[in-house]
Amino acid sequence: MKKIKTLSEIRKILLLLLLFSLTQPLLSHEKENWYILLSESHLNDEAIKVALKVLKETGLQYGLKFTIQNDNKKLSQNSILVGTANRNIQTGKLVKKGKIQEHSRFKKGNNLKI
């Protein structure tokens, strides 16, 4: 299992998560709650931990609250799934039900380069 190690990779992950979260209205005074569901291996990855810490801190400045959860939790309306079907339980369930489709370069055995 490859771990994300470079600052460049962390920045790319943060950018993708932040861009996704910014699709919601930010002008409200109420905090917008988002749940990021990750596998146990993601939760133990130091680079991911750093990226999520920065995302949480930045989100608060824009009225966004990010809660990190294990991927065995139930999806809510504002859920961000991190990981392919091989690494995230909830992603796997959605792929199996045909609700989402994984791109071929994310499937097991393919190396993803960001």
Image: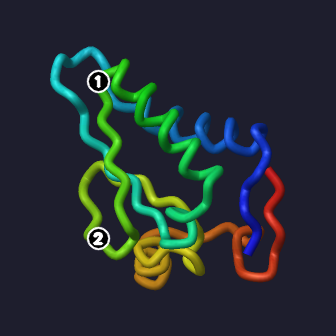
Q: Amino acid at mark 2?
A: Lys
- Report helix, strand or loop for mark 2: loop
Circle 1 packing at 10 Å, graded few (<14), some (14-19), many (20+), is some
Give above or below for 27 relative to 22: above
Q: Quadrant of residue 31?
A: top left
The residue drawn where x is 83% and y is 56% is 113
Q: Quadrant of residue 9?
A: top right
Q: CA distance from mark 2 to mark 1?
A: 23 Å
How far across and down, in percent of the image, does residue 35 sit? 33, 51
- Report helix, strand or loop for mark 1: loop
Q: Nearer the viewer, residue 104 or 59?
A: 59
Q: Is residue 63 left or right of residue 48?
A: left
How far across and down, in percent of the image, does residue 37 sit? 40, 61
Q: Which mark is residue 63?
A: 1
Residue bearing the label numbered 2: 73
The residue drawn where x is 35% and y is 54% is 79
How far across and down, in percent of the image, does residue 13 sit? 63, 44
Q: Nearer the viewer, residue 41 or 80?
A: 41
Circle 2 packing at 10 Å, graded few (<14), some (14-19), many (20+), is few
The residue drawn where x is 61% and y is 34% is 15
How far across and down, in percent of the image, does residue 84 sit? 59, 70
Label count reads 2
